[in-house]
Amino acid sequence: MSNYHVKAADRPQALTGEAIRALRQRQVEGISRRRLLRVSLGGGLALWLTEVTAGSIGFLWPNLAGGFGGVLEIGTFDDVEAGNTDIPWTEGFPAYFPHARAFVMLIDPARQQFIPGDDESGDGTALNVRVLYQRCPHLGCKPNPCLKNFWLECPCHGSRYDRLGIKAAGAQYGPAPRSMDRFAIRVEADGKLIVDTGKLTLGPLPVALGQPGIIPPRTPTGCI
Ligand code: FES
């Protein structure tokens, strides 16, 4: 014998006026349309508030925790030299600092020191050091310093910059519209370099090779 018991379906009743009234007065089964609307609106609002809160924390956290977006310490001349013995940093070659998302380079390698002072513009000439944001001004890739020619070269579309981040003018040197952007810096009395990654100055316009203001590449060919 089978375990299934087939129940007879409810017989539909004629929709008389009385039956319709009874149906209207009957408690709605499951969830009503009004309640569904309220739950959906409440859920949407809660989700939006969560997103806004998480976004704000994500934005503020690096600044609060001393991460990118805030004021960061790079170190003294000796610190940078000691941490970059594998590259010719003392000759003016850019050294990379991931926590600051920046390249640090001497302006004049003949002067083997940082000069104490403040530079909001990030030019760095008076302090003998410049700190460049790692982002290529074209579409945001990270240019790489090339040991061969001492330039920075963007692997994405071939924009080329001298070792101080000045973009070489001309289509053959890539599509970036300007030189690399600079962070505001400070060298303290004890020689410690501090970078404010929340203050960025846009890089100047490209300079034609052979003109003052751009350092020629050491070799005619580079790394890309
Ligand atoms: Fe650097 Fe396009 S992103 S050249």
Image (cartoon, rainbow, N blue to C red):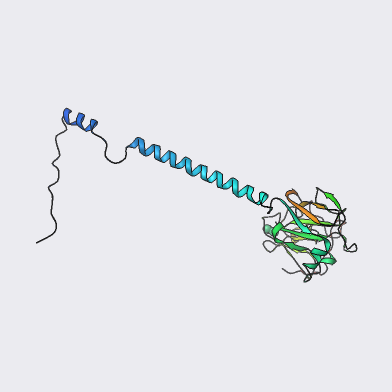
188 vs 10: above or below: below
Q: Residue at x 60, y 49 (%)?
A: 58
In terms of image quadrants, where is residue 129?
bottom right
Q: Nearer the viewer, residue 164 or 175?
A: 164
**Percent from the top left, x then y, of residue 2?**
11, 60
Residue name at image x 31 percent, y 40 percent: 31
Q: Nearer the viewer, residue 172 or 125?
A: 125
**Left or right of 94: which side holds 65?**
left
For the C terminus, which image quadrant? bottom right
Q: Quadrant of ligand 1?
A: bottom right
Q: Is residue 87 left or right of residue 18?
A: right
Classify 151 as above or below 185.
Answer: below
Relative to residue 112, is residue 19 drawn left or right?
left
Between residues 6 and 137, which one lies in front from this camera angle?
A: 6
Which residue corresponds to the image point at 44% horizontal and 42% vertical from the top-left? Answer: 43
- Residue 162 image offset from top left, x and y in percent: 80, 61
Which residue is most to the left? 1
**Residue 163 picture quarter:** bottom right
User: Which residue is situated farthest in the right direction here?
Assistant: 110
Residue 179 vertical placement versus 79 (above, below) = above
Residue 42: image location, x then y, percent: 44, 39
- In the rendered image, the quadrant that contains the N terminus is bottom left
Q: Position of residue 56 (x, y in %)?
A: 59, 45
Which quadrant holds residue 23?
A: top left
